[in-house]
């Protein structure tokens, strides 16, 4: 047997490089996850203004430059924490491409779609409402937070539009599409979730049923 050592060595180098690259990617993901988890805890317990990048780094067990290199700014770190909180994981899949979205689209009635959406929304709000409210509350005095608040509001508008499209495909809308989106955008406001769960003591299940029921009545005609 004739062995081409050049090819063998090249292949070994390729395998070694791929292996090292996979290890680096896995380590980077673990580091990012640790930073986001630490940021979530501190932003939630201390608030945005009182949480420093140094405090997040210490909580995560990494250096300040690592946090800065990974996220760039404290506002972007908050956005990353919000994204993970909304989704419930750090998988790089947008909410509207997830399994629940396909089930909601496949539902045969508008009410069925809204029940599926409300189930996911309740969990997302429970994990993220405090962080989102922190961004909006601090937006007035911080340009970075103001930009983030606008980004979050636009993101919620996009989701509201998608939900209205789901409903409109199955049942006539009570008002125009634009008005319906504005209505749902307001209903999805994290501050509303905070008021009814934290202030009024509603359970997630009660919020979920209320949201689905309110959305049906606000978006579609009674008959």
Image (cartoon, rainbow, N blue to C red):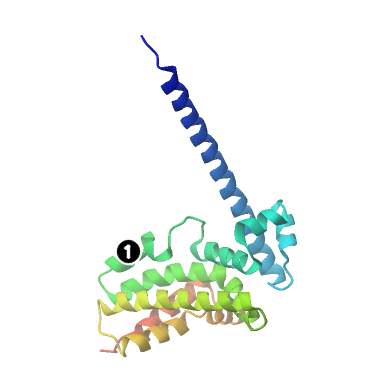
Residue 99 is at least partly visible in this image? yes
Q: Quadrant of residue 71?
A: bottom right
Residue 152: give x, y in percent of width and height: 51, 75
Q: Quadrant of residue 196?
A: bottom right
Extreme residue toward the front, this view? 6
How many other residues sit within 10 Å of disc 1, few (<14), some (14-19) or many (≥20)? some
Q: Residue at x 41, y 75 (%)?
A: 158
Which residue position holds label 1? 103
Task: Report the front residue among 143 and 80.
Answer: 143
Residue 119: give x, y in percent of width and height: 43, 69
Residue 202: give x, y in percent of width and height: 55, 77
Residue 23: give x, y in percent of width and height: 55, 39
Label 1 sits on a secondary structure element that is: helix
Q: Quadrant of the C terminus?
A: bottom left
Q: Quadrant of residue 65?
A: bottom right
Task: Report the front residue among 83 and 108.
Answer: 83
């Amino acid at each position: 047997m004739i062995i081409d050592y050049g090819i063998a060595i090249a292949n070994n180098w390729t395998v070694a490089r791929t292996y090292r690259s996979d290890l680096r990617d896995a380590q980077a993901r673990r580091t990012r996850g640790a930073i986001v988890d630490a940021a979530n805890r501190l932003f939630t317990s201390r608030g945005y203004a009182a949480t420093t990048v140094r405090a997040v780094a210490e909580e995560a067990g990494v250096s300040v430059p690592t946090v800065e290199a990974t996220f760039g700014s404290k506002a972007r770190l908050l956005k990353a924490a919000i994204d993970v909180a909304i989704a419930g994981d750090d998988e790089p899949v947008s909410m509207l491409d997830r399994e629940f979205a396909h089930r909601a689209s496949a539902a045969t009635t508008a009410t069925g779609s809204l029940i599926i959406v409300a189930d996911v929304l309740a969990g997302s709000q429970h994990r993220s409402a405090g962080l989102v409210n922190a961004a909006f509350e601090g937006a007035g005095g911080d340009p970075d937070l103001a930009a983030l608040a606008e980004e979050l509001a636009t993101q919620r508008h996009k989701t509201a539009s998608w939900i209205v499209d789901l409903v409109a495909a199955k049942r006539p809308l009570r008002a125009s599409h634009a008005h319906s989106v504005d209505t749902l955008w307001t209903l999805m406001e994290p501050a509303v979730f905070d008021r009814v769960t934290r202030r009024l003591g509603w359970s997630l299940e009660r919020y979920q049923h209320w949201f689905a029921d309110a959305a049906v009545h606000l978006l579609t005609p009674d008959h």
